[in-house]
Image (tube, grey):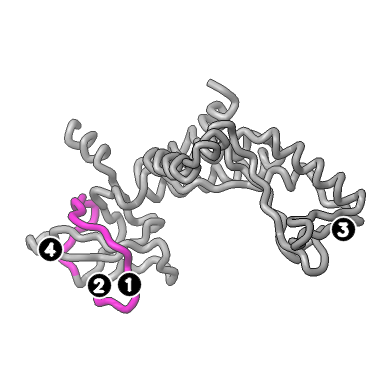
């Protein structure tokens, strides 16, 4: 077990990850830990990725390199394209030393694809200057470039990553612990198997369990109510009164 797994075990030791809400809350705790304890550690984003894989959450990243390399006040630079010279990067000594330190720290990255974003119009860039994004990639990526298959390589990596992260689309059942919508024949504490899952549309006629005004985490679940009717209900993935189950949870419950 390496340091990252030890940190994960410590942070998650008292967290309940049996529901979607519990996993979201646990991952937020991991993000807070990373922001407070690992913001200047090159293992930070590896920690966040492993936590995301374990908890089935979209991975977040922290800009470790910028935390390690402060921008000098006197740094001045321009990045532009010249028809005679092609892409041109110009900087004073303070900016060039800054770029050098950025590249040195980025080279220590523990994750392929980690990057530094230097935004257009933001120091050290002045005037009519482009922004610049610098990536640190592994040898497999460059081998794919030589073979002309870099898009396939990236696509395969993303597919494998998404496969390791359980998405909301794989929700198999839900349970309400608080008040239930009166318009539907459903009961609190009862587990309902999900027969369909879809995005929620605010202009539709589907009822929604109240939780908050934002709708970006609301999904429409289809299920059979207590009267045997196929119905739909909008549920917020982060609602603490809703417990979501995946198929492996149902297998465990059946075994018990």
The answer to which quarter of the image holds residue 82 is: bottom right
Q: What are the residue bounds of the magenta stretch?
A: 184-205
Mark 2 to mark 1: distance in Å? 8 Å
Q: Nearer the viewer, residue 201 or 118?
A: 118
Q: Position of residue 22 (x, y in %)?
A: 41, 46
- Dividing the picture into quadrants, the one containing residue 119 is bottom right
Q: CA distance from mark 1 to mark 4?
A: 19 Å
53 or 193: nearer the viewer: 53
Would residue 55 be visible to someone looking at this image?
Answer: no
Q: Earlier in the sequence, mark 4 or mark 2?
A: 2
Read off the residue under disc 3: 76
Mark 2 or mark 3: whose residue is earlier in sequence? 3
The 10 Å Cα crowd at callout 4, few under 14, some 14 to 19, many 20 or more, is few
Judged by depth in the image, the label closer to the viewer, 2 or 1, is: 1
Question: What whole-number distance in Å separates the C-alpha atoms at marks 1 and 3?
Answer: 48 Å
N-terminal of the pair, mark 1 or mark 3, is 3
Task: Give the SS element for disc 3.
Answer: loop
- Which residue in the protein does label 1 denote? 201
Q: Earlier in the sequence, mark 2 or mark 1?
A: 1
Marks 2/1 in contact by CB < 8 Å: the verdict is yes
Where does label 4 land, which residue? 230
């Amino acid at each position: 077990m390496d340091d990252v797994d030890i940190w994960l075990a410590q942070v998650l030791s008292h967290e309940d990850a049996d529901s979607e809400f519990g996993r979201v809350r646990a991952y937020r705790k991991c993000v807070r830990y990373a922001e407070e304890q690992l913001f200047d550690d090159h293992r930070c984003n590896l920690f966040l990725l492993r936590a995301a894989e374990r908890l089935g959450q979209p991975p977040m990243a922290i800009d470790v390199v910028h935390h390690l390399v402060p921008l000098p006040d006197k740094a001045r630079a321009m990045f532009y394209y010249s028809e005679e010279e092609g892409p041109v990067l110009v900087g004073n000594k303070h900016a060039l030393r800054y770029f050098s330190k950025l590249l040195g720290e980025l080279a220590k990255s523990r994750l392929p694809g980690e990057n530094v974003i230097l935004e257009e119009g933001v120091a050290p860039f002045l005037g009519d200057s482009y922004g610049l994004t610098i990536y640190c990639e592994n040898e497999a990526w460059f081998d794919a470039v030589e073979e002309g298959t870099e898009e396939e390589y990236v696509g395969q990596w993303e597919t494998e990553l998404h496969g390791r992260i359980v998405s909301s689309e794989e929700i198999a059942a839900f349970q309400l612990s608080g008040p239930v919508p009166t318009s539907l024949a459903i009961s609190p504490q009862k587990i309902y198997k999900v027969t369909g899952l879809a995005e929620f549309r605010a202009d539709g006629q589907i009822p929604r369990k109240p939780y908050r005004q934002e709708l970006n985490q609301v999904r429409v679940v289809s299920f059979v109510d207590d009267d045997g009717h196929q119905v739909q209900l909008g549920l917020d993935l982060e609602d603490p009164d809703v417990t979501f189950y995946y198929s492996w949870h149902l297998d465990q419950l059946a075994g018990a």
